[in-house]
Amino acid sequence: MSAGHAQFTRATLTLGPVLYLWEGSRWRDFYYRIADEAPVSHVCIGETVCSKRQHFYEPYLADVIDRLESAGKQVIVSTLSLITAERESRYARAMIGDGGYPVEANDLATLGMLAGLPHIIGPTVNVYNSATARLLAARGCVAICLPPELPTESVRRIVAETPEVAFEVFAFGRVPLAISARCAHARSKGNIKDNCRFVCGEDPDGLPVHTLDRQPFLAINGVQTVSYTCQSMLADMHDLMAAGIARFRLSPQCCDMVAVAQVHEDVLANRIAPEEGIARLRAIYPSAPFSNGFHHGKEGAAWIARQAAATAPYADHETDMAVS
Amino acid sequence: MELICPAGTPAAFREAVDAGADSVYCGFRDETNARNFPGLNFTRDEMAEAVSHARQRGVKTLVTLNTFMRAGQEDIWYRAADDAARIGVDAVIVADFGLMAYFAEKWPAQRLHASVQASASSAAAVNFLVEAFGVRRVVLPRTLTIDDIARVSRDIRTEIEIFVFGGLCVMAEGRCSLSSYATGKSPNMNGVCSPASHVRYRREGDELVSILGDYTINRFPDGEAAGYPTLCKGRFHVGEQDGYAFEDPVSLDVMDQIDRLREAGVSALKIEGRQRGKAYVAEVVSTLRRALDASASERPAILSRLCMLSEGNRTTTGAYDKRWR
Amino acid sequence: MKPLPDILSTLAEYMPISVAQHISALLMAQIMRRHRDLFERLGEHRCKRFAFAPSDLPLAFVVSPNGPSVTVCRKPPVPEADAAVEGPLFMLLALLEGRQDADALFFSRDLTVTGDMEAMLALRNALDDSNIDLPNDLGAMAGPLAPLVSRVACGVRSRVLAEGEASWS
C-alpha cells in the first residue's frame, strides 16, 4: 500500500444522497435522525436524479444542514447525475457558488465548474483507472466514490496508484445502474416526463421491475434505473479497508438507516463478524436480496458467498455464519 | 453536413466508402472499442489498409477507442492509441479521460473526438472536455432535444456530431450498467452490451423467448417483429402490467429533421451499426446519402424503405423530440 | 422472398443422402479453395459446429470450420450442433454471400437462430467479410461450362433477390 494512505486510520461511513422522491417532511426527519443517531462521518444531501424534484427539499435544506453540522457530520452537497437543461447547469453553478460545503460532481458539467476547487467525485462519473483518478485529483478532487460496477481488482489498483485521493465504495443499497432522458416511472403510469405528476413519489423505495416470468430484476426511480437487489459489501469491508478504502457509502433505502449504519460500524470496528452483520442487515432490510457480484467481477445481481477459510478470524461466530 | 458511417469489417468499410460516406468509423479487434463482438473489427493491418483505401477516395477514417481503460491493463488502450496515431487515422473517438489525456500529451496533433460514451450532455460538460483535452468534436448523447442541441451549440467552440439513424440507446450512453448487472459484461468495461455469450433464444409454444443471463428479456408471439436482446428494450412486468418498461424494440431515425439539425449547429450526422452486415451498410448509407443531397420534400419517399431494416421494423425520433421523454 | 421451386425440394427429398453429401463436400471444398481466410475471424469458435436448416428443404447441413467439413442429414429433427440457423434456402444463401443483413432478417422473424449466439455471430461476421460470390465461385469448378453455370446462377439469384426486395420495400 502506498504511503499516502493513512494506514492506521479506520475507514468511516458516508450516507449517500437519498435517490428517491420522499415527501419533504419525511426527508427532513430522516436527516434529523441521521444527524442525531447514525455513526456516519459524511452525509451527502441534494437531488441527484431529477431536477424536477428539487423544490420538494429546498424549504428544509438549511435546517437539515444545520442539524447535521451541529452533530459533527461533514456535509457534502450532491448534484445531478445527468445535466442537460441550461436551468440544471445554472442550479449546479449556484450550489458551487454557495460555498461552505464541498460539492460532489456526478456529471461532467459540474466537474468542469469545480476545476481548482476542492471537490468530490460521485459514483456516476466514469473513473475506471488511476490515469483518470490522478487527472481528476490534479483538478482539485479530494475524494472519489468509485463506480459500483468496478471489480475489486480495479478498485485496489486505482487506490494504490492514487494516494492523493480518499476513495469510497458503494457498500449498501440498490445500485444506480442507468439514467435516461425518458422517465420510465411516468411511462409506467401512462404519463411523459413533462407531465409526470411526480408519480415516482408513490414508490419511495423504487418501483420493482419483474421479468415476464415474474422474476424480480430491476427497480425504477424516476429517470433512473436501480438494481432490484441491494448491494452489500459487509463481507469485504475489511479487505477493502486494508486496500486503502477510506469510506463506505450507504445509500438510503426505506428501512432503518441508523441501524444499517450501526451494523456497518460494528463490522468495521470488529465488534461483530461480517456474517453476523449480514444476518442483521437482512432483518433490517428484508425487501430485497443482497448482491455483491460487481465487486467480484461477476454479474452485479449475483451474491458471492465468502469462502469458509476467509472467515477464520471470526471463529467465535460460527453459529451466526450458519444462519447467514 | 458530414455523413459518418459504420464499418465492422473491411468489406463493410469498402461498401460504406462506395455508397457515399464522408467518413467511416471503425475499431480494432479488441476491447478498446464498444462493439467488441466476436468476428468483428479490424486488425492493425486491415486498419492501415482501410485508411489508405478511404484516403485515396477523399473519405476520412475515424477510429473508436471508446471503452474505459481497465485498471492495470491500460497498455492495451495505449498501444491501440499509438497504433491509430501511427497509422495516421483522421480522428480518434475517445471516452476515457485518462486516454484523452494520453492523446493530448503524447499525440497532440492527433484530432480528438469525444465519444458519446464520454457523456457530455451540456455546454459546460463539452467545454470541460475542450479545455482539459483539446477535444475538436463532441458526439452528443441521445438525451437532448433539437432545441437543447441548439442551445449547447451556441455556448461551445467545437464541432457537434449526433446519431441520426440506427440503434437507439434509451439510457444516457456511457452511464449504463444494466448489461453488467445481468451478465458481468458492460459497454464501458468490455465494449459489449447484452453480449452474445449470454444470449439464448428458445421456442416455447407460439413464442420466441429471448433470454439474457438468467433473465427473460422478451417473448415474441409468432408474427411479431423482434429486436435485440438489450435490457432497455425488453418487455417486463411493472406495476400490474406487462409491457416495454423503457422503450419498445425500435431504432432511431431523425433524418426527416436534417434541416433543423443543421440550423441547430450540428456538423456531422452519424449512422449507428458497426455490428450490422455490409448489405445493411450499403443500403442505409446510399439511401441517407441520397436523402442528404435531396430536397426536403423528396426525402420522405427516399427514407421510407429503411424501416424494414430497423429493430422491431419500427423507428422513433427518440429524445430529439421532447414528447419521447 | 420467393419460396423454393417445388422441383428443388422434391429433388432433395428423393436424392440419396450420400449424393447430397458428396455434392455439398465438393461445393464446400471449392469455396474454401477460393476463400482460404474464410474462417479466420471465427477465432476460438472455429472448433464449433454450425447447423444450417433450410426451412423449405427436407435436409440440414452441419458445417465444422475446423475440418473444414460438411455433413448432410435429413430433417426433422435439426441435427445436433453448437449453433443453428433456420430459414428459407435462398435467404441462407444470401447470408452466405453477405447480400442480406442477418439482423434485419431476424427482426422480421424470417430467420431463427438457436444455440451458441457468440459462435453464430462470429460466423455471421466471418461470412459477411468474405466476399463469397456463389455463381462465380461455383462456376469456376464447372470447367469449360463455367461461364454458362455462372450466368444461370446469377440469373436465378438476381430474380430471387429482386422479388425479396419487392416484398420489403
Image (cartoon, coloured by chain):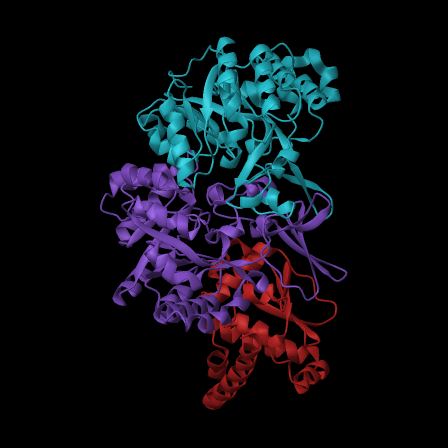
Chain colours: A cyan, B purple, C red
Number of marks drawn:
0
* Residue C38 in sight in this render: no
Q: Residue furthest front?
A: A59
The picture places residue A90, in percent across and down from the top left corner, at 38, 34
Answer left or right for A129 relative to A212.
left
Examine the image and state in which quarter residue C111 appears: bottom right
Which of these two is toward me, A108 or B83?
A108
The picture places residue A58, in percent across and down from the top left corner, at 50, 25
Which residue appears at 62% of the width and 21% of the height? A310
Which residue appears at 49% of the width and 9% of the height? A70
The picture places residue B319, in percent across and down from the top left corner, at 48, 51
Which of these two is toward me, C92 or C49?
C92
Answer left or right for A246 relative to C63.
left
Answer left or right for B145 relative to C111.
left
Which residue appears at 57% of the width and 64% of the height? B313
Query: For the N terminus of chain A, which image quadrant?
Result: top left
* Residue C9 in sight in this render: yes
Query: For the C terminus of chain A, which image quadrant?
Result: top right
The picture places residue A217, in percent across and down from the top left corner, at 66, 40
Which residue appears at 60% of the width and 77% of the height? C1
Q: Residue furthest left?
A: B109
Which of these two is toward me, B201 or C47?
B201
Q: Is residue C21 above or below residue B199?
A: below
Examine the image and state in which quarter residue C60 appears: bottom right
Which of these two is toward me, A25 or A65?
A25
